[in-house]
Image: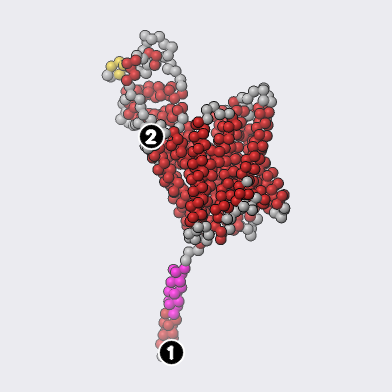
Amino acid sequence: LFQMANSWRSFLVLITLAHVASVAAEEEEEAKASPVAIAISVMLMGSIGFQMLMFYLVNWPDADIQRYSWQVISQTISIFCAVLLFQACNGIVEENLIEGSSPMVEVMIDMTQMLFWLTCMQVVLAVTSGAIHDLIGGEEPNEEAVELNVKSWSVLFSHVAGFATINAWGSIQQKYLNESPFMAFLIVPIGYLGLFIFYHGYDYVREHIAHMDDGEKDEFEKIWDEETEEAENDVAGLSLSFLTVQALRFAISGILPNQEGIESWSDAISHSSSECHHLIGCGCIFFLLSLAVLNAERCVKEPSERVERILEILNNYFTFGLSWCLFYGVRWAISATHFTNENALLMVAIALFLSGASFLMIFVLDKIEDNQLFGEESEIAEGAIDKMITGLGILIGFSWEQSFDTAVDVVAEGMEETCPPTLSKMIMSVCLVLIVFPAWRNHILPTEQELSQETTEEGAQKAQLKKYASQHFDLFMQHHTSEQDLDRAHLLMKKHRREAHGHKHPGHKVPRGLKHLMVSSTGIIEVDAPEEHKKHGDHKKKKTAHQKDLTVSLLA
């Protein structure tokens, strides 16, 4: 009996333990995933999906889609590097110099930081362009290498200086012009006047240095001046458009965001749909004004250098303004859905949504342009489409820039117990830039530049030559290609190479009676004669279209 009682007791204990385990399992199954787990999962799936989408787009059959895709990638990475550098340096400045100081001291420090980055931009471009190689010593640089170096550093430092300028003028807007939207908007003409004075001073220094050695501007000094002015125009357009949108957001919602455009969480999720629509409508107005500037550029014949530069700044201003309005309008709309309380997850969701929507719109606009729905001679329509596509590309860059910045802040705050946030942010920023910037400069930017040059007549000829060369290579690799076809293809390749590089036929000085003949199994035929030896009747051969199968043309 005693043993039987112990057996029943053990049996009841086992049943109880099994019941407890099943209840615990059910509770575990019912437990919801944490916001951190959701954010990590969305980031993982979103990043992989976005990367694979980029592979599809950069290899798309349409050359325009390839070009737009590389432009978006290049803009996103350049903005990413610029934001990391500026935010890391600005965090150290704020912690060690600004924190606890008066508003006047903060404004002075921010203005000094802006001048520091603008001056760095001038110096770096002077060195990379080869304009001061006589002063610092060294051999005369290669012009092709100079073009790529100047473009890469120009884009990087123009964005860094642009964010520094936003921070400087934004501090004045926050401290002294925050009473009303009209007061907040006054920083725009003040900022333009200040930048005009700074740019005039920098231009005087550049002209003095350029004429200091021989009294004339050489090719490298011209590159320095042109690229620096283009970078300064980008700085003005980026910073002044952001400050304008800050004032517009203040006017629409009654809340002036901080210098970085950030609102408190409670304010960010409380915007109504009408406020979102108003801000996106302002973006449409920016787009229409950019078309007006585009039309003015075409109407003004032989504008002065100053007028041309003002038009370029306005062009950048309205294009950036379009992107800022669309970004913050969509951000207000998505935040108002209250689908998450995690800022990092919200930024990733906004970036993914804007990327998908923007690329879809780019596809539609590209089809409209390819099919010439507005007419073959509608330059204004083509300019409007290009302007909209440029704005959408910048919009994608802005959206991912906000995600990157938020991610770095979250990681820095998570390491607060082991390392000060400003120091950890600086270390992460430097490491990421050292990894990302060389890859962008050596691989992504050259591809973008090459595809952009294909839109010009000279670039299109070289692009066509590359396609011919690719088809020529395929002919050599195919085992069934005859020797006769290879000879004919090789002769045509030489002809297309001369046309692309502007070289003359080697027989152009040969007397008219001599001919270049090829002996084949089908007989003796004249091949590749100089143009001046051809009769008028010999021009019946069809031109090969840019998109035609080039293998056929090589063997035609």
Q: Height in image: 337 above or below 3? A: above
Mark 2 / mark 1, whichever is N-terminal: 1
Q: Height in image: 20 above or below 520? A: below
Nearest the viewer among 293 and 537 is: 293
Q: Is residue 183 left or right of residue 62?
A: right
Q: Position of residue 401 (x, y in %)?
A: 54, 48
The residue wearing badge 1 is 2
The amino acid pointed to by label 1 is Phe
Q: Label 2, secondary structure: give it.
A: loop
Residue at 38% across, 30% down: 546
Q: Height in image: 8 above or below 122? A: below
Residue at 63% across, 49% down: 183
| Mark pair 2, 1: CA separation | 101 Å
Nearest the viewer among 154 and 263 is: 263
The amino acid pointed to by label 2 is Gly
Residue segment shown in magenta = 16-31
The residue wearing badge 2 is 375
